[in-house]
Image: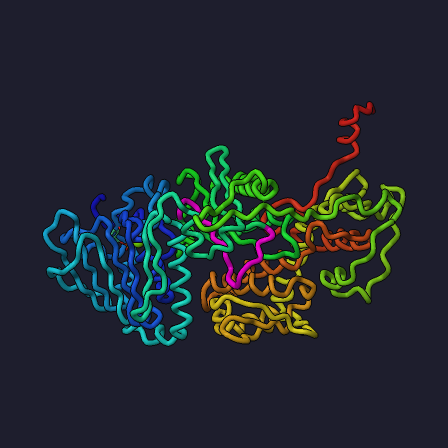
């Protein structure tokens, strides 16, 4: 391991906003990352009172020399990078040299460490940022960090700590992510003196670790994925669409070993599952994307939970195709979990969306009209003039820019005819953009109408969902949700944003709770508002495979024309495409 050095000002300026110790779980995350970066093979976590009283992480990693202990606590001091080049190629989880300093500033911290060659350990203490020591300490090889009394010197922040159970739940989630990312490392978690989780190192047995962390039911029903192309590798377990999920969310995606929640990735995954997932259930997965560290910028977010790909488009396509293939060919896929006492579940048949052209050219023939679509999207069916008949000649003066719908293709595309030729619309992507812009407008006017549900939808929830709900009831109300905790593991949805009232209430509520949790406390609604709205829009938008009538298709086209930025969905993909008559003529070699 290289020496710890204070970063140059130049480099410090290149590093994204300083980290904040938002709650015990944020400190725990940093400590776990440090242990993994130090090459630990065993990591033990001890928490008291949800971490507020004590967070201790002990590892058997490389250790820190006596001379460097104080430096490890200094701001912008790190052994992991020393140049801009290093920053661009970073392979370690940490690189800012800030975490220990930030934690030490708001706690009573003790850092004890022993390098293998040293006769005994050394320890330094630090109370609210002022180090004392080093003194001889007791420890086998490795490092132990004790963080006591978080926020003892910042009572205002301390007040924001939630109940012990809530803080513990957040810590446990952070622990699970670390454990899933490294099956070759043994992990233990204790809370208030009781063992909560004990995970033995199982190198090469990712499936065993996943089963231990997320349950055997998931591991058994998932398909194992392994795809590689052009410097990208995607591997791991993808929950089969038929997996009947337990009560907890199980969506874990790692980029070069780092847990991320990234809109681009989330979108690629959702798209890949879209065709095979019935009724919009949440897919479960534990997936790893690996690529050259130079191709992904991890220095874009304070908690590093988001990344930026140099070629986002290529990454999106790769993930989408790799996963679609894996999900579409379950018979060929290896069973995901081969635990001794379990048989791999036989691949189950998938439900493919009803296919076929739903209307006929220019006849206005549609399928039965699904009630609600209009109202969901446009919310004013009644005061709308009847839809115009589809004219059988294009090029008339009043043909709107996106033309008139002719048919629906494979439940995915709307085909329309305008003055120039054929317009092809990705109906989900387009609808998503329309809903998103409408939500934004409604939020701007603080007028997100709530639609009470006649019969509340109740669902089994993760403990974290319930605590998120308790913490952010007001935010949720502003977004148009009325959710009520029924028990520590059950939630009732009483009202939804009126614009999304036909969305799957459970999935929508879960997705929003998850976003709020990820975005963190107070800033959720302001800074991350649009991302929340994008999530809502995606869940509220009409799904692929949904049969639309011609009037519905035309209504969507008209809405697109009236919507800003409707040329792209919220994820930057195009929503429609024009194929001109000239292009068609060329294809068919029709001379002019
Ligand atoms: P960063 O991880 O970004 O380098 P930190 O503040 O988390 O910054 O840690 C500062 C430095 O302290 C690290 O670069 C590393 O050299 C050292 N360090 C921290 N934790 C450990 C550990 N568990 N084992 C070995 N070294 C550690
Ligand atoms: Mg660190």
Residue at 24% over, 64% down = 146
> Horizontally, is 206 left or right of 372 in the view?
left
Relative image position of residue 484 (x, y in whole percent): 56, 75
Residue 241, placed above or below residue 459: above
> Horizontally, is 359 left or right of 533 in the view?
right
Is 256 within the magenta? yes
Q: Residue 28, can we see it? A: yes
Q: Residue 12, can we see it? A: no
Relative image position of residue 584 (x, y in whole percent): 77, 31
Between residue 4 and residue 280, name the one nearer to us.
Answer: 280
Residue 222, placed above or below residue 456: above
Q: Quadrant of ligand 2?
A: bottom left
* Residue sticking out furthest to the front: 341
Q: How many marks?
A: 0
> Horizontally, is 453 left or right of 43 in the view?
right
Relative image position of residue 185 (x, y in whole percent): 32, 50
Per the rendered image, the range of residues in magenta is 241-257
Is 496 within the magenta? no
């Amino acid at each position: 391991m290289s020496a710890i050095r204070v970063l140059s000002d130049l480099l410090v300026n290149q590093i994204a906003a300083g980290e904040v110790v938002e709650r015990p779980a944020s400190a725990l995350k940093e400590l776990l990352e440090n242990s993994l970066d130090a090459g630990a093979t065993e990591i033990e976590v001890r928490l008291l009172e949800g971490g507020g009283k004590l967070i201790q992480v002990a590892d058997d990693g490389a250790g820190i020399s006596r001379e460097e202990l104080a430096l490890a606590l200094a701001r912008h001091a790190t052994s992991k990078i020393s140049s801009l080049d290093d920053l661009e190629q970073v392979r370690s989880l940490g690189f800012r040299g800030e975490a220990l300093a930030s934690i030490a500033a708001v706690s009573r911290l003790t850092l004890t460490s022993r390098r293998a060659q040293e006769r005994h350990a050394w320890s330094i203490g630090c109370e609210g940022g002022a180090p004392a020591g080093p003194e001889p300490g007791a420890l086998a090889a490795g490092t132990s960090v004790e963080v006591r009394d978080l926020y003892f010197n910042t009572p205002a922040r301390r007040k924001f700590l939630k109940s012990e159970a809530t803080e513990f739940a957040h810590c446990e989630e952070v622990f699970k992510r670390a454990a899933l990312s490294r099956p070759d490392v043994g992990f233990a978690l204790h809370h208030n003196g009781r063992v909560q989780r004990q995970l033995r190192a199982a190198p090469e047995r990712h499936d065993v670790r996943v089963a231990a962390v997320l349950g055997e039911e998931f591991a058994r029903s998932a398909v194992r994925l392994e795809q590689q192309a052009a410097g990208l590798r995607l591997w791991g377990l993808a929950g089969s669409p038929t997996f009947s999920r337990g009560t907890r969310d199980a969506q874990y995606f790692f980029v070069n070993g780092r847990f991320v929640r990234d809109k681009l990735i989330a979108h690629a995954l959702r798209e890949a599952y879209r065709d095979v997932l019935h009724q919009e259930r949440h897919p479960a997965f534990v997936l790893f994307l690996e690529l050259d560290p130079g191709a992904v910028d991890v220095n874009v977010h304070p908690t590093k939970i988001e990344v930026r790909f140099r070629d986002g488009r290529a990454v999106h396509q790769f993930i989408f195709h790799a996963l679609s293939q894996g999900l579409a060919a379950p018979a060929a896929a290896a069973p995901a979990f081969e635990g001794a006492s379990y048989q791999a579940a036989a691949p189950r048949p998938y439900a493919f969306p009803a296919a076929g052209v739903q209307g006929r050219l220019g006849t206005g023939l549609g399928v039965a009209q699904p009630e609600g679509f209009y109202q969901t999207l446009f919310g004013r069916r009644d005061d709308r003039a009847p839809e115009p008949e589809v004219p059988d000649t294009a090029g008339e003066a009043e043909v709107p820019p996106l033309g008139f719908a002719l048919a629906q293709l494979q439940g995915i595309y709307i085909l329309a005819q305008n003055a120039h030729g054929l317009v092809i619309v990705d109906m989900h992507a387009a609808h998503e953009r329309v809903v998103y812009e409408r939500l934004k407008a409604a939020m701007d006017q603080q007028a997100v109408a709530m639609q009470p549900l006649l019969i509340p939808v109740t669902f089994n929830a993760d403990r974290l969902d319930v605590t998120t709900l308790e913490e952010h009831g007001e935010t949720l109300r502003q977004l148009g949700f009325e959710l009520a905790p029924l028990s520590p593991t059950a939630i009732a949805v009483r009202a939804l944003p009126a614009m999304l009232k036909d969305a799957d209430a459970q999935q929508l509520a879960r997705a929003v709770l998850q976003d709020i949790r990820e975005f963190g406390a107070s800033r959720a609604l302001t800074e991350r508002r649009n991302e929340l709205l994008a999530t809502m829009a995606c869940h509220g938008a009409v799904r692929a495979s949904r049969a639309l009538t011609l009037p519905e298709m035309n209504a969507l086209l008209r809405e697109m024309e009236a919507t800003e930025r409707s040329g792209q969905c919220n994820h930057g993909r195009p929503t429609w495409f024009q194929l001109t008559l000239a292009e068609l003529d060329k294809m068919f070699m029709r001379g002019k």
